[in-house]
Image: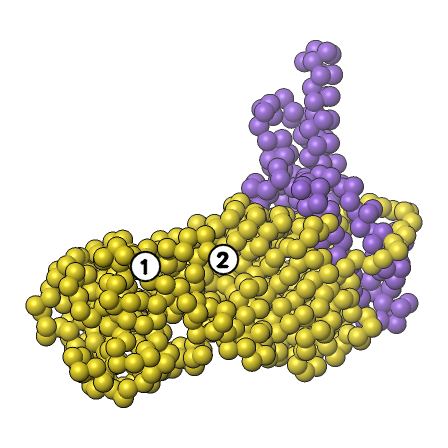
Chain colours: A purple, B yellow
C-alpha cells in the first residue's frame, strides 16, 4: 500500500469507525460485564479492524464486519477469564447478535439528547446520577450513605434510567416527525 | 412488556453491569433476553444510557425547571417494587452472594424458569395495580388528564369508584363495566369501553393491556400520541382511531387522519410498520407480523355513541334508542338496518345504516302507480322521522338486488310499525327474485281484527307464490294499536314470533332453501296486484344474518319503545 492510498484508507476507516462507534460499543457493553474491560475490547477491536481493513469490502456493512471482530475479541476475553467472569448463554448471545444484524444500521448514533433529558430530571434524581456516575460511587456505598436498601436504590436508578431512555426516544420521535 | 417488567429487567441489567448480580438473577436475565425480543431492545436502550453516563466523568448535571411527565408513575413503580412483598425464586445450591462465575443449571427442573418469571410478572402487576394508590401520596402524583364523563361505569381501584370530573394521575386503571371518557392534558380525547385495563403513562402516552378505546386528537400536540400494548404501538399523526388489545393481537382502525402501526411495544424500536389512513385497519399478531384487517370500523364506541349513552343515562328516551341503535349498526351480522331518518339531501332515498354494508343497500321511495311516494312524518320521537305508506297509492321502497341481501341461513327480521286501526299493516319487507318467484324471506303483520287476514304475523321462505306451506302464520294475537315492535327469527329449524319484545309463538319449521339474488321491497311483496301492501307508518327495519335471542329482542323493545 503506497503512502497516498494508505492515507485515503485511513481517512475512510476513521469515517466508518466514527459512524458506527456507538453501535459497536453498545454491542460490547451489552455482552461484557465490566465497563472498563468493554472499553478495552472496543479499543482492541478498533486496532484489529484497522490492521485488517484491506479485507473489508467497500459498500458492505462496516458495523457487521466490525462486530464480527468484536465477537472474537469478546470470546477470547471470556475464555481467558473463564474462572472470574460471567457471560450469557450461547442462545442469548445469538439473540443479541441476531438483533444487531437486523437493527444495527437503524440504531441511532446521535447521543445529543442525553443532556436535554438530564435537565428534565428532578434535583434529587440528578444528584443520584451524579453520585453514581460522575463520582463513581458504588451502589452499596450510596445505599449506606443514604440509609436506603441496595435493592431500593437499584429500583430508583432503574426508574431514572428508563425515564432517560424514554426521554431520548421521545426526542428522537419528535425529531423524526 | 409491562412497565413493571421493564423496571425489573432494568434492575437486572444494571446489576449485571455493576457486577453485583446474583446467580438466580443472572439466570433470569439470560432467560428473559432469550425469550422476549423486547428484552433485547430494552437491553440496548439501557446500555446506551449507561454507556453515555459512564463517559460523562466529572460533568456537573443540573436539574431542570420541570420534571419529566412520567416522574410520579415511575417513582410509584419503584416504590411498589421496594415495598412489595418479595417473591421467592427457587435458588440453586450455591450461595446467593455476588458471583464471579455462573454455571447454568444442567439438571431438569420441575418448574420452568419462564413459568416462575411469568408468575413473578403477574404478581408484580397485581401488586402494582392494587398498591399504587396507597403508596403514592396524592400530592406526588402527576396529573395527566380528567375523567370528563362516564356511563354505567364501574372501576376496580383500591381508592373506590371514580366520579365524572375527577382528576386523573399517571398510573393504572381498570374499568370493569360501562364506558368512560377521558380528556388528557395533551388535548387527546379517549373513550374507553369496559372491560379494559390500561395505564396512563403520561398525557401523551397510554399503555393498553386489554380492552378497547377510541382516541381523538382535538388539537395539535407537541408530542405524538402513542397507544401501545405488549406487542404493538400505534403512533398518531393527528387523527381519530380505535385500538383493541386482547391476549394475542393488537388491532387498530383509523376513522380520520393517519396513524402508523408498529410491531413491538416500543414505538421507536420495531421490525415492521404499516401506515394507515381513513377507513383502514391493521393488526399486529402475537408473532409480531402486521396484517391488513377488514370490517373493523364497527368494533368501537366513538364519541357520538358515547354521548348518546350519556344522555340516555339522564333519562332521554330518544337517546336510549339512539345509543342502542348505534350498537345495532355495529353488529357485524347486520345485513340491512333502516332507521327511516329523512335524508334532507335526497328525500327519495332510504339510507341503510348497517356498518357492515354501509354505502350499499340504500332504498328508493317509489309507487306502483307512479302517483305519489311514501311521505315523511314524525317517528316515535320528535327528533326522528318515519315513512307513511298509503296502500291505495301502492307505495313501496325498493332496494336493488344485491348478494349481501341473500340469506338462507339463520335470520332475524324486526320492525317498528304504527297501526292506528284495522286497516293498517300488511307486507313489511320481501326479498325475492321477482313477481310470484322464489322468495328468500318475507315478513308481514296485519291487525288481527281485519277480517281478511285473521292472523297477526306471517313469515315465509318459499319457492314461489304457490308454495303456501312455507308461509307460516303466528297464532291470533291481541289487537294492539299504536307503535309496536314485531319480530321473527328462523334458525332453519324453529320459527319464533315476537310482539313488543315478548315471544308469542314458536313453530317447528325445518327448511333451508337454495339462495337466489334478489332485491328488497319494503311495503309490498313484489306482486303488482298485492292487496296487502303496507298501510301505516314504519320507523325501523332490521334484517340480520343471525338469530337474536329472546333477551335481545326484549332489549330491542325496551330500548326502542317510545
Which residue is rendered at x = 74% and y = 71% of the image?
Answer: B167
Q: Secondary structure at mark 1?
A: loop
**Front position in the image: A31 or B451:** B451
Q: Nearer the viewer, residue A128 or A64?
A: A128
Name which of mark 1 and mark 2 comes first in the sequence. 2
Reading the image, the residue beneath label 1 is B373
Asked whether, in this view, residue B363 is left or right of residue B122, the answer is: left
Residue displayed at 69% across by 13% down: A5
Q: Residue furthest bottom?
A: B478
Against B337, residue B551 (above or below) is below
The label nearer to you, 1 versus 2, is: 1
| Residue behind mark 2 | B251
Q: Could you say which is closer to the camera, residue B535 or residue B484?
A: B535
- Is residue B11 visible in the rendered image? The answer is no
Label 2, residues with CA under 10 Å away: few <14, some 14-19, many ≥20: many
Examine the image and state in which quarter residue B333 appears.
bottom left
x, y (%) of residue B252?
A: 51, 56
* Number of other residues with Cα within 10 Å of mark 1, as a class: few under 14, some 14 to 19, many 20 or more: many
User: Which quarter of the picture shows residue B428?
Assistant: bottom left
| Side of B2 where B19 appears, left or right | right
Provide residue B198's location: percent of width, then percent of height: 61, 67
B300 shown above or below A27:
below
Amino acid at each position: 500500500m503506497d503512502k497516498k492510498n494508505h492515507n485515503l484508507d485511513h481517512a475512510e476507516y476513521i469515517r466508518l469507525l466514527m459512524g458506527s462507534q456507538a453501535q459497536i460499543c453498545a454491542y460490547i457493553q451489552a455482552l461484557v460485564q465490566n465497563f472498563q474491560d468493554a472499553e478495552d475490547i472496543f479499543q482492541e477491536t478498533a486496532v484489529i479492524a484497522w490492521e485488517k481493513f484491506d479485507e473489508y469490502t467497500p459498500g458492505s456493512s462496516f458495523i457487521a464486519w466490525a462486530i464480527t471482530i468484536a465477537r472474537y475479541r469478546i470470546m477470547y476475553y471470556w475464555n481467558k477469564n473463564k474462572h472470574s467472569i460471567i457471560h450469557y448463554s450461547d442462545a442469548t448471545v445469538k439473540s443479541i447478535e441476531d438483533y444487531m444484524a437486523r437493527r444495527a444500521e437503524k440504531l441511532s448514533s446521535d447521543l445529543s439528547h442525553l443532556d436535554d433529558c438530564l435537565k428534565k430530571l428532578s434535583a434529587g434524581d440528578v444528584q443520584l446520577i451524579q453520585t453514581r456516575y460522575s463520582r463513581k460511587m458504588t451502589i452499596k456505598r450510596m445505599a449506606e450513605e443514604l440509609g436506603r436498601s441496595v435493592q431500593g436504590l437499584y429500583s430508583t436508578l432503574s426508574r431514572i434510567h428508563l425515564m432517560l431512555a424514554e426521554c431520548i426516544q421521545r426526542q428522537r420521535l419528535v425529531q423524526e416527525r | 412488556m409491562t412497565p413493571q417488567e421493564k423496571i425489573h429487567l432494568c434492575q437486572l441489567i444494571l446489576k449485571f453491569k455493576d457486577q453485583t448480580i446474583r446467580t438466580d438473577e443472572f439466570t433470569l436475565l439470560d432467560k428473559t433476553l432469550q425469550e422476549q425480543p423486547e428484552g433485547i431492545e430494552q437491553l440496548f436502550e439501557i446500555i446506551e444510557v449507561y454507556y453515555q453516563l459512564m463517559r460523562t466523568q466529572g460533568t456537573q448535571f443540573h436539574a431542570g425547571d420541570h420534571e419529566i411527565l412520567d416522574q410520579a408513575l415511575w417513582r410509584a413503580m419503584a416504590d411498589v417494587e421496594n415495598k412489595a412483598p418479595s417473591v421467592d425464586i427457587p435458588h440453586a445450591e450455591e450461595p446467593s452472594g455476588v458471583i464471579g462465575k455462573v454455571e447454568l443449571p444442567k439438571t431438569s427442573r420441575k418448574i420452568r424458569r419462564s413459568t416462575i418469571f411469568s408468575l413473578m410478572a403477574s404478581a408484580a402487576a397485581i401488586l402494582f395495580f392494587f398498591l399504587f394508590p396507597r403508596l403514592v401520596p396524592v400530592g406526588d402524583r402527576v396529573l395527566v388528564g380528567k375523567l370528563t364523563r362516564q356511563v354505567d361505569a364501574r372501576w376496580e381501584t383500591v381508592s373506590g369508584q371514580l366520579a365524572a370530573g375527577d382528576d386523573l394521575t399517571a398510573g393504572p386503571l381498570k374499568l370493569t363495566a360501562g364506558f368512560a371518557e377521558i380528556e388528557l392534558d395533551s388535548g387527546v380525547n379517549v373513550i374507553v369501553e369496559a372491560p379494559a385495563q390500561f395505564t396512563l403513562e403520561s398525557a401523551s402516552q397510554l399503555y393498553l393491556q386489554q380492552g378497547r378505546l377510541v382516541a381523538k386528537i382535538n388539537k395539535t400536540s407537541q408530542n405524538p400520541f402513542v397507544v401501545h400494548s405488549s406487542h404493538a404501538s400505534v403512533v398518531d399523526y393527528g387523527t381519530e382511531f380505535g385500538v383493541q388489545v386482547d391476549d394475542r393481537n393488537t388491532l387498530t382502525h383509523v376513522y380520520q387522519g393517519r396513524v402508523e402501526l408498529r410491531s413491538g411495544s416500543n414505538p421507536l424500536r420495531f421490525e415492521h410498520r404499516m401506515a394507515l389512513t381513513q377507513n383502514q385497519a391493521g393488526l399486529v399478531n402475537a408473532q409480531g407480523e402486521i396484517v391488513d384487517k377488514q370490517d373493523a370500523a364497527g368494533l368501537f364506541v366513538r364519541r357520538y355513541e358515547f354521548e348518546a349513552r350519556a344522555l340516555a343515562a339522564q333519562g332521554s328516551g330518544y337517546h336510549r334508542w339512539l345509543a342502542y341503535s348505534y350498537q345495532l349498526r355495529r353488529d357485524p351480522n347486520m345485513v340491512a338496518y333502516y332507521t327511516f331518518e329523512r335524508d334532507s339531501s335526497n328525500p327519495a332515498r332510504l339510507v341503510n345504516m348497517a356498518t357492515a354494508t354501509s354505502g350499499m343497500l340504500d332504498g328508493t321511495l317509489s309507487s306502483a302507480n307512479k302517483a305519489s311516494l311514501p311521505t315523511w312524518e314524525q317517528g316515535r320521537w320528535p327528533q326522528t322521522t318515519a315513512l307513511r305508506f298509503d296502500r291505495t297509492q301502492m307505495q313501496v321502497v325498493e332496494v336493488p338486488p344485491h348478494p349481501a341481501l341473500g340469506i338462507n341461513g339463520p335470520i332475524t327480521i324486526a320492525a317498528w310499525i304504527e297501526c292506528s286501526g284495522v286497516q293498517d299493516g300488511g307486507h313489511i319487507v320481501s326479498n325475492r327474485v321477482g313477481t310470484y318467484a322464489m322468495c328468500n324471506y318475507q315478513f308481514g303483520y296485519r291487525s288481527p281484527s281485519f277480517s281478511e287476514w285473521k292472523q297477526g304475523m306471517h313469515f315465509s321462505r318459499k319457492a314461489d307464490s304457490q308454495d303456501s306451506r312455507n308461509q307460516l302464520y303466528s297464532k291470533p294475537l291481541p289487537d294492539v294499536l299504536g307503535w309496536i315492535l314485531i319480530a321473527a327469527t328462523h334458525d332453519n329449524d324453529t320459527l319464533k314470533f315476537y310482539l313488543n319484545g315478548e315471544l308469542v309463538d314458536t313453530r317447528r319449521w325445518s327448511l333451508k332453501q337454495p339462495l337466489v339474488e334478489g332485491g328488497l321491497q319494503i311495503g309490498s311483496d313484489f306482486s303488482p296486484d298485492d292487496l296487502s301492501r303496507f298501510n301505516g307508518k314504519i320507523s325501523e327495519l332490521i334484517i340480520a344474518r343471525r338469530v337474536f335471542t329472546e333477551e335481545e329482542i326484549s332489549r330491542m323493545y325496551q330500548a326502542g319503545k317510545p
